Amino acid sequence: MNKLKTVNIKGKEYVEVNERLKFFRSNYKDWCLTSDVVELTDDRCVIKATIFDDYGNIRATGHAYEKEGSSFINKTSFVENCETSAWGRALANLGIGLDTSVASYEEVANAVKQQADAPKAKPKLDEDKFNNMLKAIEAGKGDAVKAKMPNYDIEDYQMNVLKQKLNG
C-alpha cells in the first residue's frame, strides 16, 4: 500500500479522511462508498457509511455521531462532519490509513480540545483545611474563607457547618 500523507496530532501521525478517500477512489475503482442517515434531529446526527465491493458485498462499515455545536465545525456543519467521520471510520475499518487510530481527524481534534477544556478536578477539603477555615471564621476572616471555598470539593456536612458558622 502506498504511504498516505499524514498530519501530526499530539505526537501521533494521522491520515485525514480526504487522503483515505483519494486512495480508495484510485485503488478500488469498482467499489462503492455509501452513507445512510440513521438519526437526524435538530441537534444530533448519526450516520452509517458502508463500503461495497464490486460484487455488492459489504466489506466495511463505520458509524459516527455528532452533536450540533459540540465543536467549532459542528456549529454550522454537524451533519456534513458526521458523514465525513463515518466515511473515515469505514475506510479505516477497510484498512485504509489505519496506522494508529480509527478516529477521524475531527474526532481526535475534538477529544484533544475537550481534554484541554475539561474542568480540572477540585481537591477535596481535607479535615486540616476544614478546621483551619473554622478557625479563620472564628478569627473574623469569614470573607477570606468564602473566597477560598469555591477552590475545593466540599462534602455536604462540611458545607453545612461552614455556612452555619459564616452566618453566625
Image (cartoon, grey):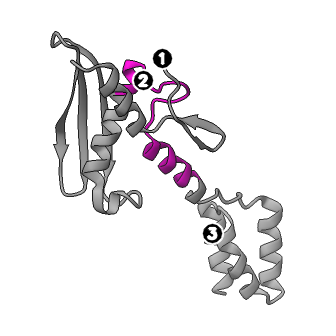
Disc 1 from disc 3: Cα separation = 62 Å
Mark 2 or mark 3: whose residue is earlier in sequence: 2
Say what amino acid the circle numbered 3 marks: Met
Magenta span has 24? Answer: no
Magenta span has 112? Answer: yes
Mark 1 and mark 3 residues within 8 Å of each other at the beta carbon: no
Residue 146 located left or right of residue 119: right
Quarter occupied by the C terminus: bottom right
Say what amino acid the circle numbered 1 marks: Met
Horizontal and vertical percent for residue 86? Answer: 31, 35
Which residue appears at 76% of the width and 84% of the height?
144
Q: Which residue is mark 2?
A: 96
Horizontal and vertical percent for residue 114? Answer: 52, 53
Which structural element holds mark 3?
A: helix
- The foreground one among 108 and 163 is 108
Q: Which mark is residue 142?
A: none
**Magenta region, mostly helix, strand or loop?**
helix
Say what amino acid the circle numbered 2 marks: Ile
Vertical placement of residue 146 versus 23, above or below: below
Disc 2 from disc 3: Cα separation = 55 Å
Mark 1 or mark 2: whose residue is earlier in sequence: 1
Q: Which residue is mark 1?
A: 1
Which residue appears at 42% of the width and 35% of the height?
19
Mark 1 or mark 3: whose residue is earlier in sequence: 1
Q: Which residue is mark 3?
A: 159
